Amino acid sequence: MIAHGKNTGTVLDEIVANKREALLEAQREISLPAVRNAAESAGSRSDFYTALSGPGVSVITEMKRSSASAGSLAPELDPSKMAKTFVYGGASAISVLTEASHFSGTLDDLRMVKAVAGPDRVPVMQKDFVFSDYQIYEAAANGADAVLLIIAILEPDQYSELLALALGLGLGVLVEVFSEDELDTALVQNPQIIGINNRDLKTLKTDIALFESLAPQVPKDKILVAESGMKGVQDVRRMEASGAHAVLIGESLMRAGGSVSELVARLAR
């Protein structure tokens, strides 16, 4: 069964609707029992939490061919080559967009990145719009070390069930929030890792001051991740000063051309 998720009144509704159709097709090709078996028999996973727990600010580098807010970014992206660049630059973890309709991602991208990053024990997070158990199993079966759960698209009971399922499979979980209400919902289940998204999902505009306003409300025992809107080292240091243990950066890296590894290295210092 494919759960529907929560209506948000934003572009997320369109993305989730497209994802629901894609999942129906995926489940026709690979049944839930089959993908569950594949997930449960997948190899060892790199520890996402530990990767973000080191001294200083950790950098989660993100690869995506396009985005809902920026359009086309890197249509000719070579996931394997980019993953090597990220690892060489010192990324603590790699986020891979696998959503097709707005981000031009695929599960093949996830598998290719895992093949590169896995031997170096750099965790790989599947970034998608998750609202069903099938997607959690699918992520684990295709090499993910961690998944993203977006509070904005989940009912509280869905969030609870999906978080427990992912953790039970040994996956790390980044729980993403955008508002004080979403943060309150997220904290009910006591997740280890909280991400604050600086992008307004209604306007698709970003303001890194959002992180600064919400971060003080996050318990000190959580790993806190700043997401979206950071253009360079100065913004990263600003997020670090406000309590970020890690930053997730994608668009700036996709636009960096041949200087990606140098930019990652500067951000990771």
Image (spheres, helix red, strand yellow):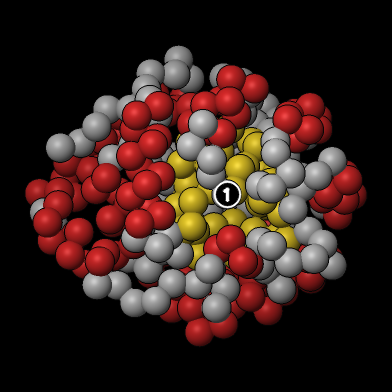
The amino acid marked with disc number 1 is Gln
Name, please, the residue furthest toward the top. Answer: 9
Task: Determine the residue positioned at 69% across, 48% down.
Answer: 221
Whether residue 143 appears in this view of the structure is yes
Residue at x 53% of width, y 68% of height: 47
Quadrant of the image containing the N terminus: top left
User: Residue placed at 50% from the left, 65% from the top?
Assistant: 124
Depth check: 104 or 16 in front?
Answer: 16
Q: Looking at the image, can residue 81 be seen?
A: no
Q: Crowding at label 1, few (<14), some or many (≥20) Cα neighbours within 10 Å? A: some
Residue of label 1: 192
Q: Nearer the viewer, residue 164 or 141?
A: 164
- What x and y, as percent, mark residue 250? 64, 52
Tag count: 1
Identify the image quadrant of residue 88.
bottom right
Q: Between residue 102 and residue 196, name the one nearer to us.
A: 196
Does 265 sit above or below residue 2? below
Residue 269 image position (x, y, % from top left) = 84, 67
Report helix, strand or loop for mark 1.
loop
**Residue 81, x across and y down, in percent:** 55, 75
Percent of width and height locating residue 77: 52, 63
Drawn side of residue 28 relative to residue 111, left or right: left
- Residue in the picture at 65% in, 31% down: 199
Is 117 left, or right, of 261 in this rendering? left
